[in-house]
Amino acid sequence: MVRSILFCCTIWLVSSTTAVLAQEQRNPLNVRNAGVSTCKQFLDTFSQPKLEITKTAFLQWIAGYSTAASRASNVVDVFPINDTMELISYVALVCRESPQATLETAAFQGLTRLRPFWVRESPNRLTLTWNDRKTEFYEAAVRPLQKELVQAGFEISVDGAYGNQTGNAVQSLSRQIGLQPTPFPTGALLYALTRPSQ
């Protein structure tokens, strides 16, 4: 009995996945229209193991949207981390607040919250390395990050230098909020620093 139920469930899951992939291949998400998708659709897509075409469309739309927002605001970049997947994770966290909102609304809200981190002049980046992981962070965003860390209760210098004080504070805050403790900022850490007070 249990085997037949498992077999039926497996057949249903395989056929459902095949149907979704076939649907995705017949009617892929148009990159230009991805912003009108709901946050729920966006979050559901990234919670599934396949749907690579749709994931790529969302990724390209968010990258393009942030680039357009940067140009429209006459700044170098509206996101301080040079990793689109970190931007995706940031927008996903904003999306969780209002699953019925459009992706464009969530992206706009998120990028607006990041205003203190907008890179206005120098495009210089720091390459931060930890445990074989690397990320690039704009030098101009270090001081705003340090100010946010001071507001979060860390006693560090606001000097624009990403040294041990800053890295240790980022790692400690990451640990406090349940993230993997790394000494460089992630999209999830920026979300924690910029989300409105509850």
Image: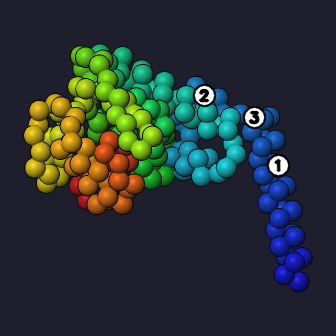
Q: Horizontal and vertical percent for residue 97?
A: 40, 53
Q: Which quadrant: the C terminus? A: bottom left
Q: Secondary structure at mark 3?
A: loop
In the image, residue 6 sits, relative to residue 93, either above or below, namely below
Q: Tell which circle, 3 or 1, labels the residue nearer the N-terminal end.
A: 1
Badge number at residue 18: 1
Q: Which residue is mark 3?
A: 27
Q: Answer yes or no: do the residues labelled 3 and 1 have beta carbons within 8 Å?
A: no
Left or right: 16 in relation to 90 = right
What is the distance, in whole Å, between disc 3 and disc 1 at their CAs?
14 Å
Image point (87%, 69%), residue name:
8
Left or right of 154: which side holds 2? right
> Badge 1: few (under 14), some or many (20 or more) residues near its Cα, within 10 Å?
few
Determine if residue 93 is in view.
yes
Q: Position of residue 22 (x, y in %)?
A: 81, 41
Q: Position of residue 23 (x, y in %)?
A: 78, 41
Q: Could you classify mark 2 by the number of other residues whose Cα lies within 10 Å: few (under 14), some (14-19), or many (20 or more)?
A: some
| Callout in the foreground (3, 1) | 1
Q: Which mark is residue 31?
A: 2
